[in-house]
Image (tube, helix red, strand yellow):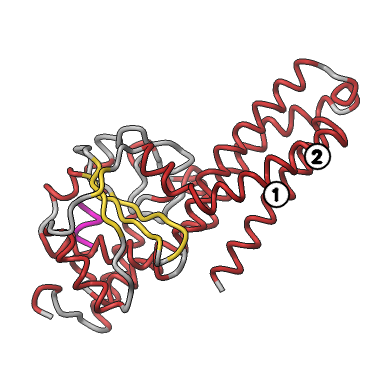
């Protein structure tokens, strides 16, 4: 089902590109937009994970690393292939998973996370990321990150087109201006729509193979740290991929919560505690 959702997502974004290209540049704009969208779909499917890992200067770790021991044990429990593991040299604790399928997946952890959390909490975070891998969220998330950036570029094209004032744009000046405003908002809505429910599902997956309490504890620690500092090179386009939004400190309560890429940490912790009450799980290293 997740594969079909991703295919639908890619087609929808291609159509959006074509429509916007037509508005900005007429028939020629539609053709150019189609070519760009097709190339981006191909690139996103095969290379978006590499681009994202490179953005954060993630370094692959040796299979003898302790993190591999933890991940192997979790993968055996979950019936998953072992993903590649990466470390990001950053003091702000956070993590994400990327790739196109369970056979081509990667999990990246910051050094801040490894230093801050205990072994059980680290295991719960890795299990959360394995949940994203199991549900194919990694493909959709990686593609969304690339297309969110592309949508921002489209908004700039719309602004540029409005300033140039071509014949096509003179007939639709208000529409061009509206696109320049709406497109970045559309990117945020796309990220929000694919992230919130999937974070809850990944949390539940982690709770089933580790402990709800360990993940709840990890999330609270990560939230507190990410309110004080931001992961280096973090961007709005990739924020939805992290276990905790790297921009937690800039999100206020009220109407701004409508545009969160993640559920609130309180919501997630409350659900985890409810899971723990319903079916207490054994701690990871005692199971």
Task: Give 29 or 50, whichever is nearer the viewer.
Answer: 50
**Circle number at residue 24:** none
Q: Position of residue 109 (x, y in %)?
A: 25, 50
Please identify the residue farthest to the top as the structure is shown: 164
| Quadrant of image for the C terminus | bottom left
Residue drawn at point x = 72 percent, y = 34 percent: 179
Q: Quadrant of residue 176?
A: top right
Please identify the residue farthest to the bottom as the structure is shown: 279
- Mark 2 vs mark 1: in front: 2
Magenta stretch holds residue 220: yes
Residue drawn at point x = 72 percent, y = 42 percent: 35
Tell me if residue 175 comes above or below residue 44 in the rendering.
above
Q: Position of residue 210 (x, y in %)?
A: 21, 73
Residue designated by label 2: 31
Q: Is residue 259 left or right of residue 176?
A: left
Tell me if residue 14 comes above or below residue 20 in the rendering.
below
| Quadrant of image for the N terminus | bottom right
Look at the numbered disc 1 and give the secondary structure of its residue. helix
Tell me if residue 180 comes above or below residue 208 in the rendering.
above
Q: Main secondary structure of the magenta part?
A: helix
Q: Position of residue 280 (x, y in %)?
A: 20, 81
Residue designated by label 1: 14
Q: Specify which label sits upstream in the sequence, 2 or 1.
A: 1
Residue drawn at point x = 40 percent, y = 40 percent: 251
Task: Give 174 or 239, whichever is nearer the viewer.
Answer: 239
Residue drawn at point x = 48 percent, y = 47 percent: 48
Question: Which residues make up the magenta segment?
Answer: 216-222
């Amino acid at each position: 089902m997740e594969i079909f959702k991703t295919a639908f997502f890619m087609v929808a974004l291609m159509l959006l590109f074509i429509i916007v290209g037509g508005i900005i540049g007429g028939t020629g704009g539609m053709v150019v937009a189609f070519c760009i969208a097709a190339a981006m779909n191909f690139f996103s499917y095969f290379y978006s994970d590499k681009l994202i890992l490179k953005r954060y200067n993630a370094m692959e770790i040796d299979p003898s690393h302790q993190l591999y021991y933890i991940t192997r044990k979790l993968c055996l429990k979950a019936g998953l292939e072992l993903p590649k593991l990466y470390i990001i040299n950053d003091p702000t604790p956070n993590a994400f998973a990327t790739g196109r399928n369970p056979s081509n997946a990667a999990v990246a952890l910051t050094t801040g996370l490894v230093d801050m959390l205990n072994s059980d909490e680290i295991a719960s975070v890795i299990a959360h990321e394995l949940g994203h891998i199991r549900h194919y969220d990694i493909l959709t998330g990686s593609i969304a990150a690339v297309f969110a950036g592309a949508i921002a570029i489209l908004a700039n094209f719309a602004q540029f087109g409005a300033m140039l004032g071509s014949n096509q744009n003179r007939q639709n000046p208000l529409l061009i201006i509206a696109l320049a405003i709406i497109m970045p908002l559309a990117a945020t809505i796309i990220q929000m729509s694919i992230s919130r429910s999937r974070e809850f599902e990944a949390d539940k997956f982690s709770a089933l193979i580790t402990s709800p309490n360990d993940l709840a504890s990890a999330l609270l620690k990560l939230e507190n740290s990410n309110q004080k500092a931001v992961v280096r090179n973090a961007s709005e386009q990739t924020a939805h991929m992290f276990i905790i939004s790297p921009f937690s400190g800039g999100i206020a309560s009220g109407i701004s919560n409508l545009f969160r890429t993640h559920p609130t940490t309180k919501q997630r912790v409350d659900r985890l505690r409810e899971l723990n009450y319903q079916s207490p799980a054994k701690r990871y290293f005692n199971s």
